[in-house]
Amino acid sequence: MSGDRSRRLRLGGFPLLSTRSAPLIAHLARRLRRGRQTVLLFANTNFFVQCAPLLPQLREPGVRLVNDGIGLSIAARLMKRHRFPENLNGTDFLPGLLTQLQAPVFLLGGRPGIAERAAATLARTHGVAVVGSRNGYGGLADTAAVVAAITDSGAEVVVVALGNPLQERWILTHRARLGPRLLIGAGALLDFLAGEVPRAPGWVRSLRLEWLFRLAQEPRRLLRRYTLDILTFLRLCRE
C-alpha cells in the first residue's frame, strides 16, 4: 500500500495496518482482481484479548488487521505515540466496501434468519449480490458442507460473523480450502444489517461512545469486556 501514507504499527505483538478507508478499499480491490487471498479483521480491545492465542496465524501473509474503536486509538497514542488516521469500524466500513467491490458475497453467521435479512438489506440499500448464506448455529455443524457451499456459490467475498475469537479461528483454519479471495471477520454486522440490534445514534458514534451505548443495551454480556478485559488489553499492549 505504497504512496497512500499507510503504515504498519505493531501493538502488543499485533501487526496493525494504519490507514484510511479509501486506500484500504483500493488495496483490497486490487488484491481481489489479482486473485490474491486476503483476510481482513477488525481489531478492537476484545479482539486483542480473545485472539492473542492466534497471533502466529495473524502474522501470516495476506492477513490485514485494522484498528476498530477508541481503545486502540488510546493505546496507540500512549504506547507508540501514534495517531491512527481513521477509525475503521467494521460496521461502518464494510457496507461501503461491499458496495464498491460489487463482487458476489456469501454471509456466514448469526441466528437462523439473520443472514437472510442482512442479505436483503445489502441488496436493497447497497446493490450487493449475496449468493449464499448459512447461520452460525446449526449451519456450522458440518464444516465440509459449509466450505463446499461457500466455494460452490461462486462468491468472491465471504463475511463471517461469529464474534471473537470464533470467526477469526474459523477463517484462519479454513482459508486454504475456501474459494473466495476476500475473507472478512465481521462481528455483529449481520445483526445490525438485519435490524436485530440497534445502532447508537449518529451523534453518539461521532463522539466515539458507541461502546457505552452497546453496554447499556447488553450489560450482562458486555460488562466484563468493557471493565476487566480492558486491563488485560492494556497489559498485552505493553508486551
Image: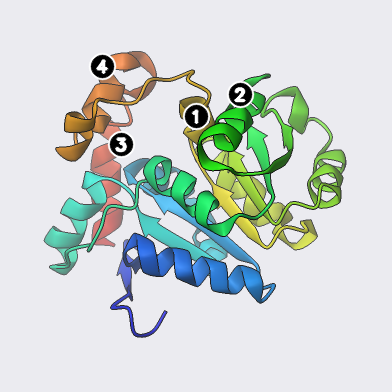
Q: Nearer the viewer, mark 2 or mark 3?
A: 2
**Whether residue 111 can be seen here:** no
Type of residue at label 4? Ala
**Whether residue 115 can be seen here:** yes
Residue position for label 4: 216
Is the Cβ of the residue at disc 3 closer than 8 Å to that at disc 4?
no
Q: Is residue 154 left or right of residue 99?
A: right
Type of residue at label 1? Leu
Q: Nearer the viewer, mark 4 or mark 1?
A: 1
Q: Residue furthest bottom?
A: 3
- Identify the disc placed on residue 117: 2
Q: Nearer the viewer, mark 1 or mark 3?
A: 1
Relative to 70, does residue 109 appear above or below in the rendering? Answer: above
Is the Cβ of the residue at disc 2 closer than 8 Å to that at disc 1?
yes
Give percent across and percent down for residue 60: 56, 70
Q: Quadrant of the C terminus?
A: bottom left
**Local secondary structure at mark 2:** helix
Type of residue at label 2? Arg
Relative to 140, does residue 21 appear above or below in the rendering? Answer: below
Circle nearer the N terminus (2, 1): 2
Residue position for label 3: 229
**Local secondary structure at mark 3:** helix
Is the Cβ of the residue at disc 4 closer than 8 Å to that at disc 1?
no
- Identify the disc placed on residue 193: 1
Q: CA distance from mark 3 to mark 4?
A: 17 Å
Q: Is residue 186 left or right of residue 178?
A: left
Marker count (numbered):
4
**Local secondary structure at mark 1:** helix
Q: Nearer the viewer, mark 4 or mark 2?
A: 2
The 10 Å Cα crowd at callout 3, few under 14, some 14 to 19, many 20 or more, is some
Q: Is residue 236 left or right of residue 141?
A: left
> Which residue appears at 33% of the width and 31% of the height?
225
